[in-house]
Image: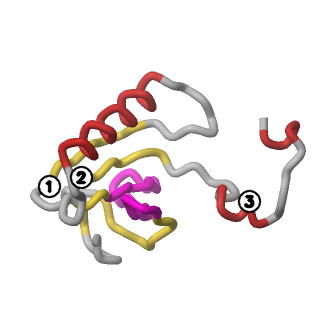
Amino acid sequence: MLEIGSLVDGKYKVLNEIGHGGMSVVYLALNERANKTWAIKEVRKTGASNYEVVKQGLIAETNILKRLNHPRLPSIIDVIDHDDTFLIVMDYVEGTSLEKRLKNGPQPWQDVV
């Protein structure tokens, strides 16, 4: 796991964890030179039963996001392949998490779309 306060790739300072799932942890990071926040998705290579399959999925995900342009979807800024982790640096999109929305029960389709 990335450490809070650590510097990633010499330019992204990890501020805090903002989410996690089965395969990854997402952090809020700051590029101090640009004074801009980013999200960094970290996928650890250790623990994956077949990391090559996981890596291909991540490559597909980043390629899809690179082709899409929508204010509610992050743009890919950087991809960093370290020895034990795969990091995807992307726009930080503020909003309510899916987990929080689901806890509030069913949503009207107009709000979801």
- Mark 3 belongs to which amino acid? Leu
Residue carrying label 1: 82
Report which residue position mark 2 lands on.
86
Query: What residue type is disc 2 on?
Result: Phe
- The quadrant holding residue 48 is bottom left
Q: Are marks 1 and 2 in contact (CB under 8 Å)?
A: yes
Residue range (magenta): 21-42
Q: Quadrant of the C terminus?
A: top right
Q: Position of residue 67 (x, y in %)?
A: 44, 22
As drawn, 112 above or below 51? above
Could you tell me residue 24's position as x and y percent?
38, 60
Q: Return the residue found at the far left.
A: 83
- Residue found at x 50% / y 65%: 19
Amino acid tagged 1 = His
In the picture provided, is 102 more to the left or to the right than 57?
right
Tell me if residue 40 is in the magenta stretch.
yes
State whether the magenta stretch is mostly helix, strand or loop.
Answer: strand
User: Observer-nearest residue: 19 or 95?
Assistant: 19
Residue 52, picture quadrant: top left
Q: Position of residue 90 (x, y in %)?
A: 42, 45
- Graded by Cα atoms within 10 Å as few (under 14), some (14 to 19) or many (20 or more), the crowding at tag 2 reads some
- In magenta segment, residue 13: no
